[in-house]
Image (cartoon, rainbow, N blue to C red):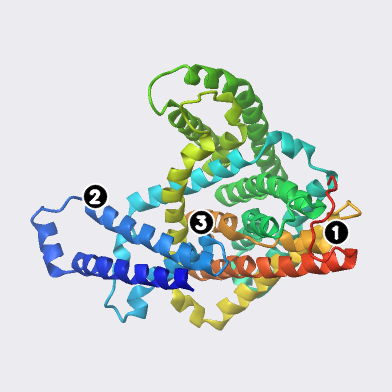
Amino acid sequence: MKSTKNFFQLLSILFLVFLPIITLANSPAREATQKVGHSDPVAPVILGLIIILFTAKIGGELFEKMNQPAVLGELVFGIIIGNLALLSGGFLNFGHLFDNASIDILARLGVMILLFQVGLESNIKDLMKVGISSVIVAVVGVVAPMILGYFVCAYLIPEAGFNTHIFIGATLTATSVGITARVLKDLGKLKTPEAKIILGAAVVDDILGLIILSIVSGIIISGSISVGAIAYITFTSFAFLIISIIVGLKAAPIIGKKVSGMKVEGMKIVTAFLFLFTMAYVADMMGLATIVGAFAAGLVLDDVSFVNKKEHHIEVLVKPLYCVFVPIFFVLMGIQVKLDVFLNPKIIAIALAITAASILGKQLCGLGVRCKNASKLVVGIGMISRGEVGLIFVGVGRELGVIDNSFFGAIVIMVILTTLVTPPLLKWSIARNDKKLGLYGTENQEVTA
């Protein structure tokens, strides 16, 4: 109770500090200084970042206090500041600050850092060790939601066209396992067979999802759906991942040894980002999304290769940049949601329908569980949450021009709903399974998945 009171006191103080800045930013005096050339062109970008980062941290803190992931707070508060002009009757209108190429670039860097971090936290050896259950769960959890999403959209919005239908279906394939992992950790269930299957499937799911994103994007860009085009993009995606992993695993120890012997400060983090940017650029040259390259870079940069006691591990070095740049992406995603589109009952119906399709599709993946001691229901529910990965997909859809404001808002609602329902449903399903096994809340026996 005291921490909540302190939080709202801090929020009030910060609001009083930032409100004059925001007001002055839209004042005639500000416009006058711009006309006579006394304004630094980077100033609007700075103000935009002040608002975005302030919003991200306050929103994240509030949702963390409600036992919800911080990314939801960043998204919801982004929606609020993106619609302040509408909510305040035009009094607070600084939407122009976010319609800026520089902020857009920073957000793109943020999503690359996010996928880089996901790759760093994934382990190739663990990926190769995952049981058949994890692989089947991942494949079914990708294919089923995509098919369901496609047919739901084709039925509800036939006028949108094939490209929109297939891309919304692809968006439903994503899984954000971070929220599930957090719940499993809180409940002391990370060593259970369900947890092993979910976490293993999540890594495979990430790779399959990125490949599907590349395939669907390639189809949309080329304008064709020939078997040859799909085969080429699929081959290119797998080839890039496999070759980059093989070359990276060979090169990383050599590079790491050389870097570790250098005395110049910051070589470790700079080397990691040079690797990240190189892989992202090569992926773009091959017609793949840059985030595919970012993920591959993180996957192959085994921190053991960098033996330098003077510096922290790569994950630790990347964390400050992660905390600054990644929230920019999520808040900007929220800012782009226009509340007026929800006045249309059809959009609400679409949002609820694709949410149902996304949940049902992930429940079907529970059928892939082959471990006799694992609960299919727990695994299926653990794969529901879309979170940040779904937002990455929908962001690409906007860039390709197949997702307009209406569909964008509907998908954001789906992301919010699936993220909100996962923790309580997961806790319920685990308690139900424990009761069935006679464990009553104790940690399940560890079983290889």
Where does residue 387 sit, x and y in percent of width and height? Answer: 59, 60
Looking at the image, tell me whether mark 3 or mark 1 is earlier in sequence order.
Answer: 1
Q: How crowded is mark 2: few (under 14 residues within 10 Å), some or many (20 or more)?
A: few
Residue at the (58%, 30%) spot, across then down:
303
Q: Is mark 2 on a helix, strand or loop?
A: loop
- Whether residue 106 is visible to the viewer of this picture, yes or no, is yes
Q: In this view, does 165 lie to the left or right of 283?
A: right
Looking at the image, tell me whether mark 1 or mark 2 is earlier in sequence order.
Answer: 2
- The residue tagged 1 is 367
- Whether residue 82 is visible to the viewer of this picture, yes or no, is no
- Cα–Cα gap, marks 3 and 1: 31 Å
Looking at the image, tell me whether mark 2 or mark 3 is earlier in sequence order.
Answer: 2
Q: Which amino acid does label 2 sit on?
A: Val
Identify whether 11 is placed above or below 216.
Answer: below
Q: How crowded is mark 3: few (under 14 residues within 10 Å), some or many (20 or more)?
A: many
> Please, which residue is most extreme toward the right here?
372
Residue 42's tag is: 2
Tell whether label 3 touches label 2 (CB within 8 Å).
no
Where does residue 92 sit, x and y in percent of width and height? Answer: 28, 74
Which sits in the foreground, 385 or 149? 385
Q: Is residue 267 left or right of residue 213?
A: left
Q: Which of marks 2 and 3 is in front?
A: 2
Q: Quadrant of residue 327?
A: bottom left
Q: Which amino acid does label 1 sit on?
A: Leu
Identify whether 54 is placed above or below 9.
Answer: above
- The residue tagged 3 is 395
Which sits in the foreground, 41 or 387? 387
- Cα–Cα gap, marks 2 and 3: 25 Å
Q: In this view, does 142 lie to the left or right of 407?
A: right
- Cα–Cα gap, marks 1 and 2: 54 Å
Where does residue 271 sit, x and y in percent of width and height? Answer: 47, 28
Q: Residues within 10 Å of mark 1 (few under 14, many from 20)?
A: some
